[in-house]
Image (cartoon, rainbow, N blue to C red):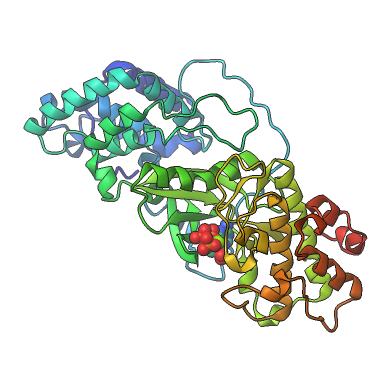
Amino acid sequence: MKRRGAKRPSNKMKGTLGKHFQVQFHHHQSSSATSSSIFTRNLLDFGSQDDPSTSVPDLDAADDKDFILSQDFFCTPDYITPDNQNLMNGFDCNKEHIPCPKSPEKLNTLKSKRPRQDGILVNPLSPTLSGSQQIVELASDNFDADEGNLEKTIISGVQKTKNYVSQSAVALRCRVMPPPCIKNPYLKDASEVDTDPFGNQRSKCAGFFPAIIGGDGLSRYHTDFHEIEQIGTGHFSRVFKVLKRIDGCLYAVKHSTRPLHQETERRKALMEVQALAALGSHENIVGYYSSWFENEQLYIQMELCDYSLSRKSSTQLFTEGEFLRAMHQMAKALQFIHEKGIVHLDVKPDNVYVKNGVYKLGDFGCATLLNKNLPVEEGDARYMPQEILNENYDHLDKVDIFSLGVTIYELIRGSPLPESGPQFLREGKLPLLPGYSLQFQNLLKVMVDHDPVRRPSAKELVENPIFDKVSKNTKA
Ligand SMILES: Nc1ncnc2c1ncn2[C@@H]1O[C@H](COP(=O)(O)OP(=O)(O)OP(=O)(O)O)[C@@H](O)[C@H]1O
Ligand SMILES: [Mg+2]
């Protein structure tokens, strides 16, 4: 068991969390050995007075630390997660011949959770969130009082000892810190809360925890994930393939390339995760798991895909059937989001990912509301129709249809579009595409029609008979 930057607690426990410790300790003593033996052994180590290496040199100082350290003990997964967890059981991500586990599939089924019978913490080793959620609730509930105590503690602690509040306690507080709490405009039944109810406390805490803001390694990203490699860059972000330490699964984590200093910048960045969260799960939309702010950057944990359409190599050239499958699956993604009142506004090969042969729409950084209640920030101009360049936002859903048509056209053409975009397509002039059926070419032509009203809706596109032969086989 590795403890990051924390000092050994005395065996005296104070406060509520001390009681939790005793409850937990009892729980682990009485539970069967295999799953909890390491944890139990370490708990015993902590209590041992015989072993000189575990003795506490300064009991007075330790008394002062009891509350925070006992809280540390339960709240940070790092205490129960070896630093080299990714190497456990001989699992080595750097060895190519060993298959890495994939992100778990997102299920559409609804699950109900059995209500808890007791009021105490459940097994902290459980990979479920229940333990940590309880801690977060506890800390939030006592936020004001706790804040006051913490302030005093820090002030007196600075005089007594340099590391009065352990780094892990600081990390814990960072996690308890709520991100900007703003109304999700994509949710139809959003509550009336539209401001940050914790703004006051957050600014106080920012002063207390310069280490978090300075980024000296107390990082949720690095605590929870093992970074494997960079898999993508965009104009605003970098995307990494990561292994989540606690569940051993692979994910993609995207984070902004530069700090978002202004509240307005952070709110804008949040639109992407709010759209993803409001949309929920769909087979043809990249799965969203979690997001958080760290060092003024927004981190987004997503389903890991294999590659984006723009990276499809020349050896994997499309046939008409494959184009139809890609188009059909993107049309289904667009139908799903449009029916929820959301438009993507940045459909392009870069933002269509492939996972196990299934096409997934990603990068909701430009997503907005169909009803124009949110500002419109169009995506890559090369894929935008003329009406958007003219700032006419009356048919935003049809913008996505145009962009999908241009995306397919670009892939057929096999070379990047001109920087200014395909003006000929905007004028409704689709060049002949030898080798492709007339039905297919006509469909593409109507998708990029100059008049948005004449373009099919996503629903009409999904239901087009041209897809009859591909709809039974959804995988490419
Ligand atoms: N979930 C994922 N799985 C695999 N690769 C991904 C994933 N998300 C993003 N990528 C890769 O990272 C690249 C950049 O991601 P993304 O498009 O989200 O960033 P961005 O900065 O918002 O982009 P843009 O420049 O289009 O605004 C993608 O084109 C893709 O290649
Ligand atoms: Mg992108």
Q: Quadrant of the N terminus?
A: top left
Tell me where residue 210 appears, x and y as whole percent.
23, 42
Q: Nearer the viewer, residue 465 or 313?
A: 465
User: Is 57 left or right of 134, judged from the image as shown?
Assistant: left
* Numbered disc total: 0
In the depicted structure, whether residue 464 falls above or below residue 298: below
Give how far across and how far down residue 402 sits, in percent: 72, 62
Which quarter of the picture shows residue 419? bottom right
**Residue lying farthest to the bottom in this orientation:** 434
Q: Looking at the picture, does residue 431 appear above or below residue 153?
A: below
Would residue 81 be visible to someone looking at this image?
A: no
Residue at the left extreme? Answer: 159
Quarter residue 387 falls in = bottom right
Q: Quadrant of the C terminus?
A: bottom right
Q: Residue at x 22, y 34 (%)?
A: 208
Taking the image in four quarters, ligand 1 sits in the one at: bottom right
Q: Is residue 354 left or right of residue 230?
A: right
Give 204 or 369, whichever is nearer the viewer. Answer: 369
- Residue 139's spot in the image, x, y percent? 37, 24
Does residue 87 sit above or below 81 in this rendering? below
User: 469 and 436: which one is in front?
Assistant: 436
Left or right, 138 with respect to 463, comes to: left
Location of residue 96 in the rendering, given as x and y in whole percent from the top left corner: 54, 71
Please say whether residue 471 is visible from this viewpoint: yes
- Of 129 and 13, nearer the camera is 129
Left or right, residue 394 beside residue 304 = right
Q: Residue at x 44, y 51 (%)?
A: 225
Residue positioned 57% across, 19% down in the render: 116
